[in-house]
Amino acid sequence: MADEKIVKVDSGNFGDEVLGAPVPVLVDFWATWCGPCRQVAPILDEMAGELDGKIKIAKLDVDSAQDVAIQYNVQSIPTFILFKDGEVADRTMGALPKPKLQEFIDRNVS
């Protein structure tokens, strides 16, 4: 992760960093071995800087936090889940290009 604005979350801090966040949180469910996940990483780095203060972007490695991935029924990666007020607001899958990822965020965050 090149951008320090992206938060790394796991089973231990998911509640505080995601569910308890005062702003919407986009969680990227990914894995180190996932090619499409690595493909979208630079886009997330860029967006984290652009959207700082509007939303938080977090990454969760499904291999090290399988319990969270199972809890949110993540069956394919990358999966992006947007949380608002501690609840799932929306979800999408796949290595989306930046405009599509921006559309996904915009339709869920006013």
Image (spheres, rainbow, N blue to C red):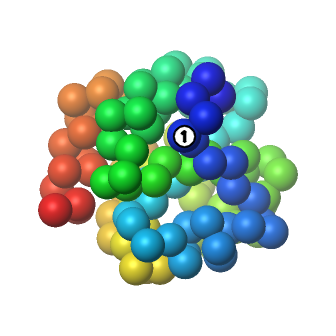
Q: Is residue 92 above or below residue 44?
A: below
Q: Is residue 99 left or right of residue 48?
A: left
Q: Is residue 68 above or below residue 38?
A: below
In the rendered image, is residue 90 in sight? yes
Which residue occupies 57% across, 41% down? 6
Which residue occupies 23% across, 61% down? 108
What is the residue that sits farthest to the front in this orientation?
Answer: 53
Of residues 22 and 25, which is closer to you in this image?
Answer: 22
Q: Quadrant of the N terminus?
A: top right
Q: Position of residue 23 (x, y in %)?
A: 39, 66
Helix, strand or loop for disc 1: loop
Residue beneath disc 1: 5
Write down the quadrant of residue 48 in the picture: top left
Q: Tag 1: residue type?
A: Lys
Q: Is residue 91 above or below residue 98?
A: below
Which residue occupies 61% across, 66% down? 17
Of residues 58 and 104, which is closer to you in this image?
Answer: 58
Q: Is residue 40 left or right of residue 8?
A: left
Q: Position of residue 68 (x, y in %)?
A: 69, 67
In the rendered image, is residue 76 in sight? no
Q: Position of residue 86 (x, y in %)?
A: 47, 79
Of residues 48 and 11, which is closer to you in this image?
Answer: 48
Q: Position of residue 99 (x, y in %)?
A: 22, 29
Q: Is residue 46 left or right of residue 27?
A: left
- Disc count in the image? 1
Q: What crowding class fits label 1: few (fewer than 14 Cα within 10 Å), some (14-19), or many (20 or more)?
A: some
Q: Quadrant of the C terminus?
A: bottom left
Which residue occupies 25% across, 39% down? 102
